[in-house]
Image: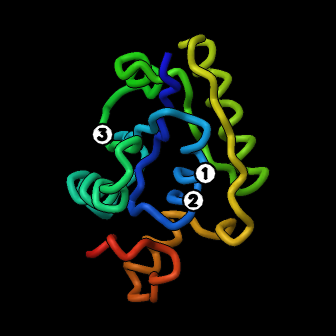
């Protein structure tokens, strides 16, 4: 049985921290689906097509990483794609508290899915898509926070 993981998020935009988690997850899984989920509580800066394109370009030489947009519950998308793992990156205790509750609910709804938490490398702890979006909106330099493939 293939070990398929879903790495869900909005990736608006994808950051070097996200890429670090994906690359570190590759030895653990046979396939990682980067799932760009629609989150009705978040206002996005970039269209989903652009975000999917960036991720496909970044991982064009890694066939074990694919990217898809989905709507609805993450666990429903896992079941649809045969993913039995949900990969999540953790930067700090606030992330852990938030993600732990979601992981527990997901386990109740879809018992086949195990959530795997990877602590981010210390260099990426302060980086978040929301901070990067603020930099973009205000003309700040984002070059050290986003991959070269992210063009806007």
Q: Earlier in the sequence, mark 1 or mark 3?
A: 1
Asked if residue 39 shows in the view, the reply is no
Q: Are marks 1 and 2 in contact (CB under 8 Å)?
A: yes
Residue reaching furthest to the right:
93
Residue depicted at 31% across the width and 32% down the height: 71
Residue 92: name its quadrant: bottom right
Residue depicted at 25% across the width and 52% down the height: 48
Colour scheme shown? rainbow
Question: Is 53 situated left or right of 8 in this image?
Answer: left
Quadrant holding the C terminus: bottom left
Q: Nearer the viewer, mark 3 or mark 2?
A: 2
Front-most of residues 51 and 133: 51
Residue under numbered circle 1: 24
Give how far across and how far down residue 63 sits, in percent.
Answer: 35, 44
Measure how far apart labels 3 and 2 are at the Cα level: 19 Å
Q: Are marks 1 and 3 in contact (CB under 8 Å)?
A: no
Asked if residue 117 shows in the view, the reply is yes
Give how far across and how far down residue 22 sits, in percent.
Answer: 52, 50
Residue under numbered circle 3: 68
Front-most of residues 147 and 36: 147
Residue under numbered circle 2: 20
Residue 126: name its quadrant: bottom right
Residue depicted at 33% across the width and 44% down the height: 67
Measure how far apart labels 1 and 2 are at the Cα level: 6 Å
Quick one: SS at disc 3? Answer: strand
Give how far across and how far down residue 49 sits, in percent.
Answer: 20, 53
Residue depicted at 68% across the width and 30% down the height: 101
CA neighbours of label 3 inside 10 A, class few (<14), some (14 to 19), many (20+): some
Q: Residue 108, relative to residue 136: is it above or below?
A: above
Q: Earlier in the sequence, mark 3 or mark 2?
A: 2
Residue reaching furthest to the left:
49
Measure how far apart labels 1 and 3 are at the Cα level: 20 Å
């Amino acid at each position: 049985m293939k070990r398929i993981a879903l790495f869900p998020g909005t990736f608006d935009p994808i950051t070097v921290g996200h890429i670090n988690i994906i690359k570190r997850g590759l030895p653990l899984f046979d396939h990682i689906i980067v799932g760009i989920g629609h989150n009705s509580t978040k206002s996005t800066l970039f269209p989903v097509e652009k975000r999917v394109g960036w991720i496909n370009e970044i991982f064009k030489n890694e066939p074990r990483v694919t990217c898809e947009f989905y709507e609805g519950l993450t666990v429903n998308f896992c079941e649809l794609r045969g993913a039995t793992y949900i990969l999540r990156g953790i930067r700090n205790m606030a992330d852990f508290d938030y993600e732990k509750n979601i992981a527990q609910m997901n386990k109740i709804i879809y018992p086949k899915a195990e959530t795997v938490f990877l602590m981010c490398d210390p260099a990426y702890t302060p980086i978040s898509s929301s901070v990067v979006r603020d930099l973009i909106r205000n003309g700040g330099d984002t070059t050290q926070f986003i991959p070269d493939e992210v063009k806007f």
